[in-house]
Image (spheres, rainbow, N blue to C red):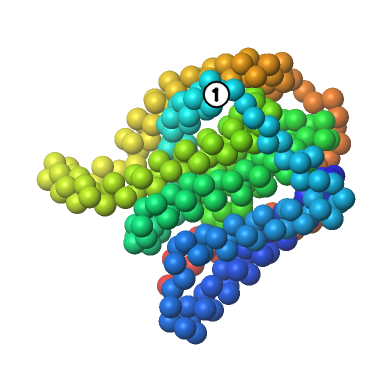
Amino acid sequence: MEYRRANRAFMFMILSTILMGVLISAWYLTSGEELSVLWNNVLCELVVIVPAIAAVLYSGESLGSVIPLKKYNIVSVLLTILYVFALFPLITLVNSISMIFVENMVDSISDSVIAMPMWIMLLSMGVISPFVEEVVFRGIFFHTYKRSGRILASIILSSVLFGMMHLNFNQFTYAAVMGVMFCLLVEATGSVWSSFLAHGVFNSIEVIFLYASEYFMDDVEQIAETQVGGDYGLLPAIGLYLLLAAIFTPIAICIVYKIAKIEGREAALTSILKGEKDNNRGSLISFPLIVGIVIAVGYMGIITITPYLK
């Protein structure tokens, strides 16, 4: 599949996701019943994966030709889990910086999440969502763009689109960073299974944290109010996360390089980490991609400013 088909798939993905949101809102207004976070998640993932798979099948190629799902070493599997933990300070830092300007979207749906049994949300957010998103963005999109020979540009573009797929500025910021780090992992292993594992572990930890916080958050808030008036502020937290990210992000890079050595793919990863220039200067941009990006950014802007207009 060539990049123009991937770009059209992204445009249809954004349009379908927005349409799905409108239909879900219409359902709520007419029936008075709110769709559960589980079904909302399932429907959103469907409108992500269907356009991407349709684009591949319409091109006449098999899914296996653009989605590398080969097995990889058990040691690399364990290092992948360690890689996720080393990335947490960086992702948390980016999320915290974004929260200076926009609402934390995960916090905004936390009540809906913990209203469901934890095993259901672990299945939905820790397995289904990571599998769909990795197949689409680190599989179909990234590997389609890679055929241009522009590896670094493919990493950046597929990661930016991954962030935009969330359709809010908060998740866009840290999802784009996660996308870059997951692309490095896929390059190190040659398999989307690795990014699926990393994504699943990351989301599962977030889900477990949401449920755990339900039990001790009241105590934490009471202590905060007693000691500092209940307002820590984001800046001290950002300073701490910045320090931790400066320590652990290089460790994460070392881990992914070790994985590449185990998998015999260190040359490919080294060329990326050293910032070697791509030989091919062909463009990955097409009109449908621009339309999709403009619509996504416009929608994110609207949902950001709407609360301030009430």
- According to the picture, the residue beneath numbered tag 1 turns out to be 74
Q: Secondary structure at mark 1?
A: helix
- Residue 148 to residue 247: above or below: below
The one of 59 and 175 positioned closer to us in this rendering: 59
Question: Residue 169 location in percent, x, y?
Answer: 53, 52
Image quadrant assignment for residue 141: top right
At 65% from the left edge and 36% from the top edge, which residue is drawn? Answer: 192
Q: Quadrant of the C terminus?
A: bottom left
Residue at image point 66% right, 45% down: 135
The quadrant in which the N terminus is found is: top right
Query: What residue is drawn where x is 22% and y is 50%?
Result: 215
Mark 1: few/some/many CA within 10 Å (<14, 14-19, 20+): few
The kind of residue tagged 1 is: Ile
x and y percent of residue 282 in the render? 86, 36
Q: Position of residue 244 (x, y in %)?
A: 39, 26
Image height of 44 relative to 164, above or below = below
Q: Nearer the viewer, residue 208 or 309?
A: 208
